[in-house]
Amino acid sequence: MGRMNLQSMERWNNLSIEEMRTLREIVSRIDRGDERISVRSVAEAAYVSTSSIVRLAKKLGLEGYSELLYVLKHERLGAGFRGAVDIYETLSFDEQTNATLDDLARALTSGQYGRVNVMGVGYSDLSATYLCNRLMEEGLFAANKSPLDFHDDTPFLSVFFSESGETRDLTFVQERLRAKGLDDYAFTAESSSTLGENASHRILVKRGRNGLPYDSNHFVINCLECIESLITRMDTMRKVQES
């Protein structure tokens, strides 16, 4: 049984949206207490092939699906399997981050925006695409492209993902939004970056992981965790609005 080391954990930044969806499907079944989680049932639910799940396990440094399931079960059930896949290890959000995530959740559930434009470049585009897909699952119209590509009067909200906060393709869009007095949210690791300083709302995302030495970059997986926290907040706010 081979354990995942810190080097293999760096591969999280290279996971595709389909691979993240597959892992989320497995984790959800573990959390609801399913006794039997077959690779075929997971593949059908995640719209992938069984062979792609086996490849995913090997990509993460594991022998195959059985070991992937074992690792995820032990991580979720708190068996102390350190160094394993910690897809949803809870990040400790500071007061400002919590407040900004609440603000974003409130904006997204307000009904005032007809479109959400989510943008990222390079590895950060994984996070942008993931949020775009999650928002569509929540019934919102989300587009993984610049609002400058749209020529309509639809009220929109812009969300940026950039580790450095200096991605020119994104700061270019942000400059034009600011000129129009439009709000935006920026997920970045650098508070003093161009994107971070000029954003209407900034969410500072760590590069490290709780309990792990900072010798590898986990910005993308930490962004995904922020996104899951955001979706949970949205669902909670909707329930309150409906009650």
Image (cartoon, helix red, strand yellow):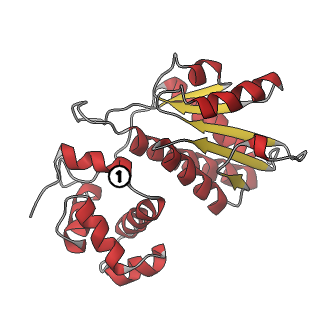
Q: Residue at x 68, y 24 (%)?
A: 200
Image coordinates of residue 164 in percent, x first then y, are 47, 27
Q: Residue furthest front?
A: 168
Left or right side of 140 for 195? left
Q: Quick check: can you spot residue 112?
A: yes
Image coordinates of residue 237 in percent, x first then y, are 66, 47
Image coordinates of residue 209 in percent, x first then y, are 31, 36
Q: Which residue is mark 1?
A: 87
Between 89 and 243, the one lying in front of the other is 89
Q: Quadrant of residue 153?
A: top right
The image shows residue 179, relative to residue 123, as above or below, that is above
Left or right side of 187 for 82? left
The N terminus sits in image quarter = bottom left
Q: Residue furthest left?
A: 1
Q: Residue at x 64, y 51 (%)?
A: 144
Q: Residue furthest bottom?
A: 40
Q: Quadrant of residue 157?
A: top right
Image coordinates of residue 70 in percent, x first then y, are 21, 67
Q: Residues within 10 Å of mark 1 (few under 14, many from 20)?
A: some
Between 211 and 56, the one lying in front of the other is 56
Between 78 and 115, the one lying in front of the other is 115
The image shows residue 203, relative to residue 239, as above or below, that is above
Q: Residue at x 80, y 48 (%)?
A: 111
Q: Quadrant of residue 198?
A: top right
Q: Quick check: can you spot residue 243?
A: no
The C terminus sits in image quarter = bottom right
Left or right side of 168 for 178? right
In this rendering, the count of numbered labels is 1
Amino acid residing under circle 1: Ile
For mark 1, give the secondary structure: loop
The image shows residue 117, relative to residue 103, as above or below, that is below
Between 78 and 66, the one lying in front of the other is 66
